[in-house]
Image (cartoon, rainbow, N blue to C red):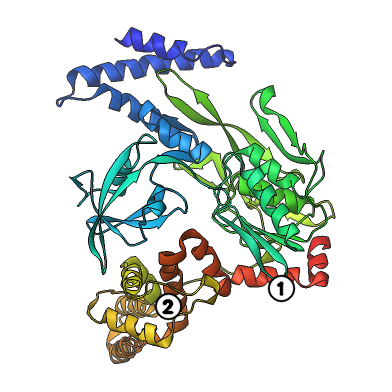
């Protein structure tokens, strides 16, 4: 067996270019691996599964490199195909688990779940007669997925209507890269881009063309929380706003074929229209190519927070037995020449990647001479502090009280105002507070944490006897103050309620539109796009 495994693994390496001294190391370690595998398989006290052993070895090897180099078994091929194409066969709805059941989170418009009238908040009781109680989200997902054209019977519980049964025919679900676009106000056209799967460039181009025809004279591209995707789609999107022939990204890898330069190939839609891009800490990969290239070419202002910092390129490799792997083959550099990779996977400390050291970071310049820095992701031109939610708000969301109250509201109100006009009234907020009377949602404020730390330190320093009475007063005062937190944080909680409730009526579109009123990033981008002097100053400083 050892010889068989050794030959199989070694031969699968093919004719890759190794340094001469590597051959011995490879042969030696494959020999050791085969010996260990043979001993475990034949002598380990309990029965082992060979496939699981090998998979663990593969995963362990790849985990030592970076998080983006992954192996996909035949069973995982469907999930990987969805990552790349955004396409799967199912009912078209996101789901979430609360306690022992999975609930409908948000049906996608014009797909099966939406067509049969599923609503956010519906509790999934059974699929084709199989009880779903206690099942994980991933397990329920497997029941809902299947071949396009096949049907399933879904038993749900809906507040105010009781138990319902829906017969759903599965379809091929192609997730939209652009779930929303439109002219919001002041002639500002807004495009929400959530992924970079096939046709992302066309979807953005079509949205921009349509909005310009409707009178948009400024454009905002929202890349917040967009984890990236296909490189060529990123280039297509930049091409909408810059001329043909511009270099957008360069890749550099181990082999000559990995060293490439990618230019725009098509005629642009508009190279002059004022353009802003929203980014945050979860904007990664292709999102960073788009935002970084537009910044380096001084074609757009960036608003928000530093992006994730992923400057690595992955290539898909087809392997035997219908398996595949995604492997990092190059690093990418945007027009200024900077590499935006934030973590250094080559020089790990105690097995963990660390941030690129400040001492090796370099400064570059944009086309207009503005200074930008590598190794930090993409830095916005206008920084907006991240919105931080109060402890009471976090506790109410994490304990699903906002989710459940939205179901209660939907059961009593069959219709709702349009998202941009919808507000939580004082009467509804009073209902929410009443709803919470018998609900548990313990939380500790930062002030309480600090009091506890002070108490521990006082005990260590032998000052506790002196401070005991004062600390007790502080605790009593905090306890009294927390009782008023629902009032003290009323505006914040209203915003959260509005967001959750409006999903029950307007789904994904509602989620986007309801957020504009309270979005600090949107407020900042409006201010800048409506002030030509500020805009020009940012692009030229």
Q: Is residue 135 left or right of residue 364?
A: left
Instruction: For label 2, count other residues whose C-alpha is less than 10 Å away and answer few (under 14), some (14-19) or many (20+).
Output: many
Could you tell me how far apart the alpha carbons at marks 2 and 1 are, in whole angstroms? Answer: 26 Å
Residue 38, image x and y in percent? 26, 16
| Residue 301 tag number | none
The residue drawn where x is 33% and y is 46% is: 168
Instruction: List the residue tagged with mark 1.
Output: 527
Position above or below: 255 against 408 = above
Residue 341, image x and y in percent? 61, 45
Position above or below: 444 against 7 = below
Q: Is residue 130 left or right of residue 170?
A: left
The quarter of the displayed image where residue 222 is located:
bottom right
Q: Is residue 389 visible?
A: yes
Q: Are marks 2 and 1 in contact (CB under 8 Å)?
A: no
The residue drawn where x is 77% and y is 36% is: 265
Q: Quadrant of the C terminus?
A: bottom right
Instruction: For label 1, count other residues whose C-alpha is less than 10 Å away and answer few (under 14), some (14-19) or many (20+).
Output: few
Name the one closer to the observer, 541 or 431.
431
The residue drawn where x is 78% and y is 49% is: 269
Q: Is residue 137 left or right of residue 327?
A: left
Q: Secondary structure at mark 2?
A: helix
Q: Is residue 510 left or right of residue 178?
A: left
Q: Is residue 463 visible?
A: no
Q: Quadrant of the N terminus?
A: top left
Position above or below: 55 against 407 = above
Q: Earlier in the sequence, mark 2 or mark 1?
A: 2
Residue 6, image x and y in percent? 38, 11
Instruction: List the residue tagged with mark 2.
Output: 493
The residue drawn where x is 70% and y is 29% is: 259
Q: Secondary structure at mark 1?
A: helix
Residue 123, image x and y in percent? 27, 58
């Amino acid at each position: 067996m050892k010889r068989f495994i050794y030959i199989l693994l070694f031969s699968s390496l093919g004719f890759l270019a190794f340094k001469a001294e590597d051959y011995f190391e490879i042969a030696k370690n494959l020999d050791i691996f085969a010996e260990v595998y043979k001993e475990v398989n034949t002598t380990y006290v309990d029965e082992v599964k060979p496939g699981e052993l090998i998979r663990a070895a593969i995963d362990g090897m790849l985990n030592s490199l970076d998080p983006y180099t992954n192996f996909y078994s035949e069973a995982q091929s469907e999930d990987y195909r969805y990552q790349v194409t955004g396409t799967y066969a199912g009912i078209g709805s996101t789901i979430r688990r609360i306690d022992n059941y999975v609930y409908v989170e948000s049906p996608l418009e014009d797909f099966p779940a939406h067509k049969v009238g599923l609503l956010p908040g519906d509790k999934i009781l059974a699929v084709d007669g199989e009880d779903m109680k206690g099942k994980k989200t991933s397990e329920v997902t497997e029941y809902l997925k299947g071949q396009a054209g096949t049907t399933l019977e879904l038993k749900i519980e809906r507040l105010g209507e009781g138990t319902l049964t829906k017969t759903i025919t599965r379809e091929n679900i192609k997730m939209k890269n652009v779930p929303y676009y439109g002219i919001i106000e002041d002639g500002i056209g807004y495009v929400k881009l959530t992924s970079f799967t096939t046709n992302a460039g066309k979807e953005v181009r079509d949205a921009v063309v349509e909005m310009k025809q409707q009178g948009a004279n400024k454009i905002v591209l929202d890349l917040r929380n967009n984890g990236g995707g296909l490189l060529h789609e990123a280039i297509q999107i930049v091409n909408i706003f810059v001329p043909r022939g511009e270099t957008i990204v360069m890749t550099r890898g181990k082999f000559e074929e990995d060293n490439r330069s990618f230019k725009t190939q098509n005629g642009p839609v508009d190279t002059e229209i004022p353009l802003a891009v929203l980014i945050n800490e979860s904007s990664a990969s292709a999102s960073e190519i788009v935002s970084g290239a537009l910044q380096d070419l001084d074609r757009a202002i960036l608003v928000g927070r530093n992006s994730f910092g992923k400057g690595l390129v992955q290539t898909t490799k087809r392997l035997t037995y219908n398996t595949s792997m995604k492997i990092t083959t190059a690093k990418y550099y945007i027009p200024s020449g900077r590499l935006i990779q934030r973590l250094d996977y080559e020089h790990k400390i105690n097995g963990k990647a660390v941030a690129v050291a400040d001492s090796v970071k370099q400064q570059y310049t944009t086309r207009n001479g503005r200074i930008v820095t590598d190794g930090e992701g993409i830095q916005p031109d206008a920084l907006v502090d991240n919105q931080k939610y109060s402890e009471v708000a976090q506790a109410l969301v994490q304990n699903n009280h906002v989710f459940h109250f939205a179901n209660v509201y939907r059961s009593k109100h069959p219709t709702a105002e349009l998202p941009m006009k919808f507000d939580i009234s004082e009467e509804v907020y009073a209902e929410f507070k009443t709803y919470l009377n018998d609900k548990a949602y313990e939380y500790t404020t930062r002030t309480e944490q600090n009091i506890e730390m002070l108490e521990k330190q006082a005990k260590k320093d032998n000052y506790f006897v002196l401070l005991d009475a004062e600390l007790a007063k502080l605790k009593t005062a905090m306890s009294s103050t927390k009782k008023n937190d629902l009032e003290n944080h009323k505006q914040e909680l209203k915003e959260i309620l509005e967001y959750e409730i409006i999903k029950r009526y307007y789904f994904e579109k509602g989620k986007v539109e309801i957020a504009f009123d309270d979005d600090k990033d949107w407020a900042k981008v409006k201010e800048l796009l409506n002030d030509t002097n500020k805009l020009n100053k940012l692009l030229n400083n």
